Image (cartoon, coloured by chain):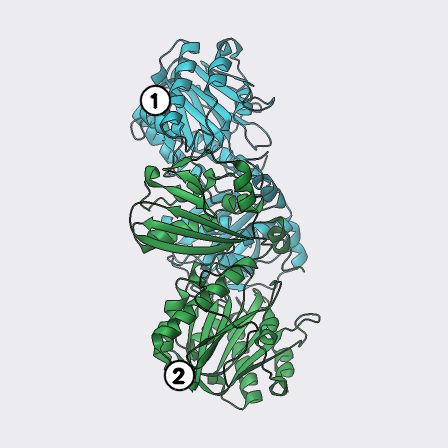
Chain colours: A green, B cyan
Amino acid sequence: MPDSTTSDVTFHAAPRFPRGFRCASRNVGLKPSARDLTLFASEVDAAAAAVFTRNHFPGAPVVLGRETVPPGVGGTLRAIIANSKVSNVATGAAGVANARRMAAAAAAELGTSPDRVLVSSTGVIGVPLPIEKIERGVVGMQGDLQDDPLVGAEGIMTTDTHPKALSASVGGATITWVAKGSGMIEPNMATMLAYIFTDAAFDAPTLDRLLRAAVAPSFNMLSVDTDTSTSDTCAILANGLAGAVSEADFLAVLRAGCTRMTETLARDGEGAEHLLRVTVRGARDDREARVVAKSIVNSPLVKTMVHGADPNVGRLLMAVGKCFDCTIRPAATDAWINGVQVVQRGERLAFDDAVVRETLSREVVEIEVALGVGDATAVAYGCDLTKGYVEENAAYYSS
Amino acid sequence: MPDSTTSDVTFHAAPRFPRGFRCASRNVGLKPSARDLTLFASEVDAAAAAVFTRNHFPGAPVVLGRETVPPGVGGTLRAIIANSKVSNVATGAAGVANARRMAAAAAAELGTSPDRVLVSSTGVIGVPLPIEKIERGVVGMQGDLQDDPLVGAEGIMTTDTHPKALSASVGGATITWVAKGSGMIEPNMATMLAYIFTDAAFDAPTLDRLLRAAVAPSFNMLSVDTDTSTSDTCAILANGLAGAVSEADFLAVLRAGCTRMTETLARDGEGAEHLLRVTVRGARDDREARVVAKSIVNSPLVKTMVHGADPNVGRLLMAVGKCFDCTIRPAATDAWINGVQVVQRGERLAFDDAVVRETLSREVVEIEVALGVGDATAVAYGCDLTKGYVEENAAYYSS
């Protein structure tokens, strides 16, 4: 686990659920043997909010999810049902009907109504959802519900190398994050699949506002490969069993956990061997800070430089300089890699190659760029580009 | 050589120069043994125009080039001197002084003035230019000048796998293109290094206008890796020795050659095994057509799909759909790969996987997307993403 930038928040050594939340996962035959169906359930109704992909081809579960938990308004949820292997995207009206059947199946199993169930699917685009396998498979899952969030995290994995969950306390309440990532990741308004559970009490519109405030600097600054998934969903459920907590404290912990989870997703990007954290300071405004940070974290030549620990730091200037519509003053631009200054006033410093090579070989590579034209800052998260990424994605459909 | 979309223009079987142009190239010690210094010369003054990178960190030769051949105005040239291995970028005032010395050295060798010489450098960013080696090396090159453009093309190669030159006739005149590409290629207003020579007679402002009209749909629609070089330069020299030719005929051939050269650069992108040609039709306007075509050609997941001949065609919809600010109607969107329809009305067709696998394995992969919302069309050019790209760029500085 990389160092977190959010060291003021202590995450639990082993992730656990807030009061009233449990989960289960199973293999129902979508994959040969790995878990492919997951159920998260709250024992009481929970206020809920969600943000979804901005891709113009949203998957059927996203179309349905916008009904169930309207963005900007929020809603009420008792459960989330999610499958991996098939994303139910580009499947037309039949796909939406299948997503509705999936919600109904989970509702029947848990004794609630379909409009209290959020549906997610992740995997290959354009393949019909094997809905009968899911309907048959969900039967009896209520009896499997248990307390370890990692069991649910395992069921939503695609090419992730490990299940991802974490939790932290705030006041008398707990917040728990469960997510999956890996590839096709440059979320916009949300990330691949990220579910957040809390027993703190908030109404849905407040949750919606807090979720957006937490997602903007975290999941929305993550990019594994510039490709925005058609399934991105980030939802938060608050069942209120722990009562009220301070909104400011809650938001601080919510942001810290979203940031930590963002770093975890970046580090486990497809084929990734390094977490790349890019901080841009001194930008003219927030938009320009974000654009420059994303340009660096997305540059294939910066990503391969990190992969090869090759001190080819002029590529940082290339990636800053291709932000055509940003205010860039070459003579004001400085850059550091893990604290080692490599660019001063727009020129490459005559540094010791061996020192930069060593620092580029660390698991966490922190790139800082100071633009010297204003006060805005942004941080973007990504990973290196490796042969493993090419290998996984040259045969994702066929394998 | 891939099929050209510009089959109405016949290119010469072996490239040759227009009247009055010759070139030479040598090893002067920047590389261990390969040719690394090139001189192109016209025996008389030539009207000239050039477009340069929009990167905010232009190399010293680009800074000087904008003086020598002001964009929008054009100028007069007798020669181009270009070195490979070191790009003279991020080298400050010393870099610009070295670029001036390079122009002066070429001018002295050819008996012209430094303001008649365009300078280019390509290679690693941020390393001082070994100017003494160039000054010593250029002495006597006038005696090497000869008639084969490929000799000049060889001297400007970096990771290109072969030298690139072509020529065609228009009226009584000839146009000759010499270029290099490979990586850090998503030109904006120009391409890596592309030189165009003609013996047709045009004044500089006309040449400037014709060059921009030819570059916009060709080099500016090329992307190997989304990274915009700090050295991009495309220049045209017209020495008038063949007299006047029809401007419309000239522009048609100029465009055809720029497009053919663009395809050649894409096919020889770093690590590339396929030329990817993406046509978007039915867009709302030209800007949206270009944005969608570039989104597809730049998507790592589309590029790896082509690399692996994996019929994961839902990724095409993902890449269209992530153009957030474009007019996309899922139900109006169709797509074809080499003429095989794979998407109809926003849904993946139930095609024969083997057929799509076979067509994706061809050297030229033509992707067509019809958006069904307007009349605008754009074509973008790129290549697949391979382990070879990662390998070359993880050690470009060190190797």
Name the amino acid type tagged 1.
Phe
Residue B48 lies, with reference to residue A75, above or below; the image says above
Of the 4 image quadrants, the one containing the N terminus of chain A is bottom right
Q: Residue furthest bottom?
A: A111
Output the chain of dot 1. B
Of the 4 image quadrants, the one containing the C terminus of chain A is bottom right
Q: Is residue B50 left or right of residue B367?
A: left
Q: Please state the total of marks drawn on the protein image.
A: 2
Residue linked to disc 1:
B202
Task: Give the structural element (helix, strand or loop) at label 2.
Answer: loop
At 29% from the left and 27% from the top, the residue drawn is B73
Task: Give the structural element (helix, strand or loop) at label 1.
Answer: loop
Q: Position of residue A63 (x, y in %)?
A: 46, 73
Q: Is residue B138 or residue B375 the one in the foreground?
A: B138
Residue linked to disc 2:
A201
Q: Is residue B119 or residue B254 the one in the foreground?
A: B119
Residue B18 lies, with reference to residue A332, above or below; the image says above
Residue A291 visible, this orientation? yes
**Image quadrant in which you'd find residue A32:** bottom right
Q: Residue furthest right?
A: A32
